[in-house]
Amino acid sequence: MKAIVLAGGCGSRLWPLSRDMYPKQLLSIDDDRSLLQQTILRLGKHVDLSDVVCITNIKHTTEINRQIAELNGTSKVLGEPIGKNTAPAVAAALEYLRREFDEDEIVIILPSDHLIKDIDKFNETIENACAIAEQNYIVTFGIKVDYPETGYGYVKVAEALGQGFKVDKFIEKPDAETAAKYMADGSYFWNGGIFVGKISVILAEFQKYIPEIFDNLESIKFANGQIYYES
């Protein structure tokens, strides 16, 4: 299994603790390790550190490499010359993995700033997700709704599929009244932003739904830990 860790956030919601050069994922919040380091170590049961790709803004690559070195890891760090948001970052990292490994390898894509306490449950969820992903599905991690949050996206589930559910639809951040209805309904989950699937299957979805990103992937160059895009 491979991993893509999205480490390009600016940490604006945690200001003033976070700063431009030290966004949230690079800070130690409740542990001696930074959130990024905790994220990488949490994957240890499923992913070798050398099979982790961190994608970030180029200005953060030095600090991320330093933090990975503290873990005695050899994870790959890819620096984007400019931030292009989540979908292009994921696509670029998938293209890197596709060139380096079998395109039918399973990959987990996850943010670098989550705080997860129940590691056993997290590992169990990854195992269940991999079993479903082997059937050429893309799995997204839902989080049980505890209160009517308006700052998160939601996932509405349909019928059961193995240890998970098929997705009925994704909903962007709702207003307070709608969020309360979602919580009462019971078939809605917060979208955790963690995805598991085969490299080839996820790239096929890019090709289908975001061809303007997919069509440019072949022109990307990877060198010295940087991503180069043709102008």
Image (cartoon, rainbow, N blue to C red):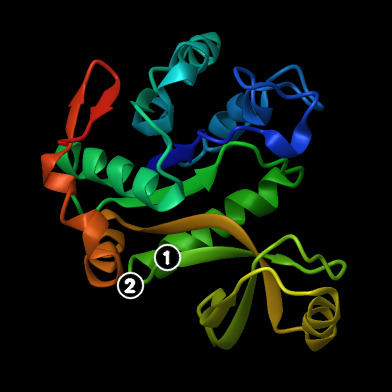
Residue situated in front as seen by the camera: 10 or 184? 10
User: Relative to residue 216, is residue 35 drawn left or right?
Assistant: right
Cβ atoms at labels 1 and 2 below 8 Å apart: yes
In the rendered image, the residue lying farthest to the front is: 231
Residue situated in front as seen by the camera: 50 or 149? 149
Instruction: Residue type at mark 1: give it.
Output: Ala
Q: Residues within 10 Å of mark 2 (few under 14, many from 20)?
A: few
The image quadrant that residue 200 belongs to is: bottom left
Residue situated in front as seen by the camera: 212 or 196? 212
Query: At 50% from the left edge and 18% from the top edge, which residue is drawn?
Result: 64
Residue 220: x and y in percent read: 17, 37
Secondary structure state at the residue bearing disc 1 = helix
Residue 167: x and y in percent read: 52, 80
Query: At 45% from the left edge and 14% from the top edge, which residue is drawn?
Result: 65
Q: Which residue is mark 1?
A: 131
The image quadrant that residue 82 belongs to is: top left
Q: Is residue 95 above or below residue 171?
A: above
User: Relative to residue 97, is residue 165 drawn left or right?
Assistant: right
**Do we see residue 111 in this rendering?**
yes
Q: Is residue 27 above or below residue 145?
A: above
Residue 77: x and y in percent read: 38, 24
Q: Quadrant of the C terminus?
A: top left
Secondary structure state at the residue bearing disc 2 = loop
Q: Which residue is mark 2?
A: 135
Query: At 46% from the left edge and 18% from the top edge, which residue is drawn?
Result: 59
Which circle marks residue 46 in the picture? Answer: none
**Do we see residue 1 in this rendering?**
no
Q: Residues within 10 Å of mark 1 (few under 14, many from 20)?
A: some
Residue situated in front as seen by the camera: 67 or 43? 67
CA gap between label 1 and label 2 equals 7 Å
In the rendered image, the residue lying farthest to the left is: 218
Instruction: Residue type at mark 2: give it.
Output: Gln
